[in-house]
C-alpha cells in the first residue's frame, strides 16, 4: 500500500508553481467594446458617389458657360442686338417655318444716310453714339416676336413676322421717318442721319443669302430714289 502511494506521488508532476489568483477587482472592470473595422467597399462607394456628384456639377456649369458664350457670339457688342451670325440663324429658322406652314414675313434692310459724314466730322465715337441710337429706335418699332440685327457698319435688318410686303413697306417708311427725327448728341454736338429701307418678303424657296441680297438691292434702289428726290428739291 505504501508503495502504491509512492508511485502515485511520483507520477504527479511537480511544477513548483502555485495556481494563479484572479483579482475580483479586475473582473469587475468594464470591458471596452472593440469597434468593427469599416467595410472598405461601402466607404469607396460613398467616395465615388461624391466624386460623381462633383463632376456633374462642374459639367453643368461648363455647359452653361458654353451656352452663354455661344449666345454672346451672336450679339453685336456695340448695340447689344443680334449680329449677322445671329440673324442668319434666325433667317434659316424662319424660312423653314414659312416653307412648312406658309406663314407671311418680311425683311426690312436699313442703311444709314450721312453716317460717313458724322464719322468724318465728329469722330468714330460719335458714330458709335449714332449706331446705338438707331438700334434703340429699331427695337422700339418691332414686336417681341420680330428680330432686329446689325449686319454691317451702318446696316441693320428687321425680320417682321405676320407681315405682308405692303405692311413691310409701311413699316419701312415709319422707320425712315423715326431715324430722321432722332437727334443723339456727342460732346455737345447734335448728330443727325437719315435712312433708306428696302423690303423683301420671305418666300418658301429662299435661302438666307438670297433673301438678304434681294432686300439689299431693294434698299439700294430706295437710296437712289431718295437721292433723286433730294436733288429735285
Image (spheres, rainbow, N blue to C red):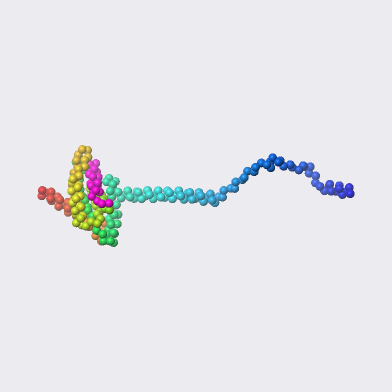
Nearer to the camera, 218 or 148: 148
Q: Residue at x 20, y 57 (%)?
A: 165
Residue positioned most to the top = 188
At which x and y percent is residue 191? Answer: 19, 42
How many numbered marks have been drawn onto this rendered protein structure? 0
Residue 24 located left or right of residue 193: right
Type of secondary structure dominating the magenta stretch: helix
At which x and y percent is residue 120? Answer: 20, 42
Magenta residues, start to end: 124-144
At which x and y percent is residue 167? Answer: 20, 55
Q: Residue at x 25, y 55 (%)?
A: 161
Can residue 27 be seen in this snapshot?
yes
Can residue 84 be seen in this snapshot?
no
Residue 102 located left or right of residue 227: right
Nearer to the camera, 27 or 128: 27
Query: Residue 134 in magenta?
Result: yes
Q: Residue at x 19, y 40 (%)?
A: 190
Query: Residue 207 in magenta?
Result: no
At which x and y percent is residue 199? Answer: 20, 55
Amino acid at each position: 500500500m505504501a508503495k502504491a502511494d509512492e508511485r502515485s506521488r511520483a507520477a504527479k508532476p511537480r511544477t513548483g508553481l502555485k495556481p494563479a489568483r484572479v483579482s475580483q477587482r479586475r473582473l469587475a472592470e468594464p470591458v471596452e467594446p472593440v469597434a468593427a473595422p469599416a467595410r472598405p467597399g461601402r466607404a469607396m462607394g460613398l467616395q465615388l458617389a461624391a466624386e460623381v456628384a462633383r463632376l456633374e456639377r462642374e459639367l453643368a456649369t461648363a455647359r452653361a458657360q458654353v451656352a452663354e458664350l455661344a449666345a454672346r457670339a451672336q450679339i453685336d457688342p456695340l448695340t447689344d442686338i443680334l449680329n449677322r451670325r445671329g440673324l442668319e440663324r434666325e433667317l434659316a429658322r424662319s424660312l423653314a417655318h414659312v416653307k412648312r406652314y406658309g406663314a407671311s414675313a418680311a425683311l426690312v434692310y436699313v442703311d444709314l444716310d450721312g453716317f460717313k459724314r458724322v464719322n468724318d466730322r465728329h469722330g468714330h465715337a460719335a458714330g458709335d453714339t449714332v449706331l446705338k441710337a438707331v438700334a434703340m429706335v429699331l427695337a422700339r418699332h418691332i414686336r417681341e416676336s420680330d428680330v432686329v440685327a446689325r449686319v454691317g457698319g451702318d446696316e441693320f435688318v428687321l425680320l417682321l413676322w405676320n407681315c405682308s410686303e405692303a405692311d413691310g413697306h409701311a413699316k419701312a417708311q415709319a422707320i425712315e421717318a423715326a431715324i430722321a427725327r432722332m437727334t443723339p448728341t456727342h460732346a455737345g454736338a447734335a448728330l443727325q442721319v437719315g435712312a433708306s429701307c428696302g423690303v423683301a418678303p420671305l418666300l418658301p424657296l429662299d435661302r438666307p443669302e438670297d433673301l438678304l441680297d434681294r432686300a439689299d438691292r431693294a434698299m439700294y434702289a430706295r437710296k437712289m430714289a431718295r437721292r433723286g428726290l433730294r436733288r429735285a428739291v
